Image: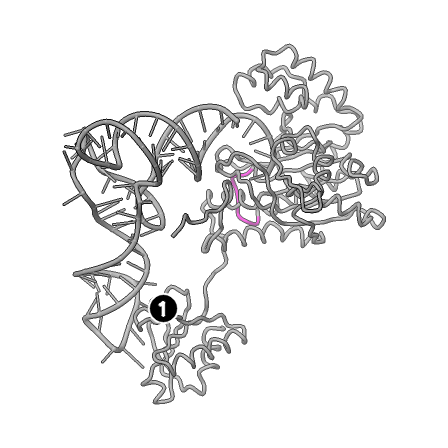
Amino acid sequence: MSEPMRAPKGTFDTLPPDSAQFLAVRDTLTAPLRRAGYGYIETPTFEDTAVFSRGVGESTDVVSKEMYTFTDRGGRSLTLRPELTAGLMRSFIEHRLYSGALPVKLWAVGSAFRYERPQAGRYRHFTQVDCEALGVDDPALDAEIVALGVQGFRDLGLRDFELLLTSLGDATCRPQYRELLVDFLAKLDLDEDTRRRAEINPLRVLDDKRPEVQAQLDDAPLMVDHLSDSTKAHYDAVREHLTDLGVSWTEAPRLVRGLDYYTKTTFEFVHSGLGSQSAIGGGGRYDGLSASLGGPDLSGIGYAVGVDRTLLAVQAEGLDVATSSGVQAFVVPLGAEAKRLAVKLVGQLREAGVSADTVYGDRGLKGAMKAADRSGASHAVVLGDRDLAEGVAQLRDLRSHEQVAVPLTELFDRVRATVGA
RNA sequence: GUGGGUGUAGCUCAGCUGGUAGAGCGCCAGGUUGUGAUCCUGGAUGUCGCGGGUUCAAGUCCCGUCACUCACCCCA
């Protein structure tokens, strides 16, 4: 045997029984969106590289060093999506969805890829639930989006998460603030990397976790103190609506997101049980994204939630979110004739909507009963030669250990009635 | 990209100062040629991550390498 193949670095397989939890988390996170009238959209896993370099922003770490970019056989530069929003916006523009009623409300779920050094909660392949409301700049919509995100976490039963909220301003006030911040940072004692970051995206420096950097930032100017009248009014309105919606939050004036397109309302969901990668979701408003992708000058707001990280949060809180797995009935045949009948019975049960299974391969009665036990079935149907000779089968309750003989002619109906109820 | 930790059975791990590879769980089979959560008995699976070095002898010591993992960075 040669070297066994392994999943690529930074990726992982989700196997039963954990995969049932993954599905439950994914579906619970999307349920509020479906209930709120958002429409499902599916876009390609890869896009022209420009969708991300122009959308997410050339200066971001995501674009400058974390993308899976390749040239296809036709010489096109393509990139595996590092997030979902830019692709949805491209689709929104391409199909002129903006020419209809606004806002256009969309949700999506799927894989995203970033070439990063793996660590707890950070993988090169991950799954995001994405929710976007495009084409209308209304604080009530910001609040709706945030509340939908919160709802998904609440529905899962999560408690140890927090909503961090701030406003990043817009084109009318951020440039002036940026000047202030650049001047402030210039006076600090910073290493070369940080200094470079201060030039490319000064706001990012505020988010640095290193104590020696944070210690110098106490007096740093904050965006929320320099909002224009209109963006301040916008932010105030968002907070009013959130209060009305019963959503609580923590003001996070130094919150910065790694994607260039965010403006005004910006937020992040963090969970305390995850270690270093604590963000389970994040998002905000983006004024310039549509225009930067060649669309009309329209605003949008949305968020992305990490399904894998949320699953880790669910596990960290010890929540049991998976719906019951396994089958309802398990058929145990003894002998060739019984085997044939078992396969037929399982097929009939499944067709009738009863989940059922049987054993495959040569196994003794003991092994088959063990398999029945593990299948999660409440009842086993034992088909033996002796029974068949008498025209009956044994219907066994695996919980109470009670067993009754059932005529073969009534078997299907009896099994269906017994486990179906 | 930078730094720390760890690599022994399917899983969790033990293996003292070098001396012919272990336990528990799980899996399979038998005890019971017709009955699953218990019990008893037996069995299978390891190039001790990989390569090199030191030594009479290396899972154990040294070097390299790869993988995994955690943190910085970044973010879902």
Q: Amino acid at mark 1?
A: Arg
Q: Position of residue A229 (x, y in %)?
A: 80, 26
**In the image, farthest residue toward the bottom:** A390
Q: Which residues are magenta?
A: A155-161
User: Please, is residue A413 above or below residue A250 in the view?
Assistant: below
- For the residue pair B34 and A77, the one nearer the viewer reads as A77
| Left or right of B48 in this view: A284 | right
The residue where tag 1 is placed is: A399
| Left or right of A143 in this view: A306 | left
Q: Residue at x 65, y 35 (%)?
A: A267
- For the residue pair B58 and A385, the one nearer the viewer reads as B58
- Residue A259 showing in the rendered view: yes
- Secondary structure at badge 1 equals loop
Question: Image quarter for residue B42?
Answer: bottom left
Is A157 in the magenta?
Answer: yes
Q: Residue at x 80, y 42 (%)?
A: A136
What chain does badge 1 belong to? A
User: Please, is residue B61 above or below residue A17 in the view?
Assistant: above
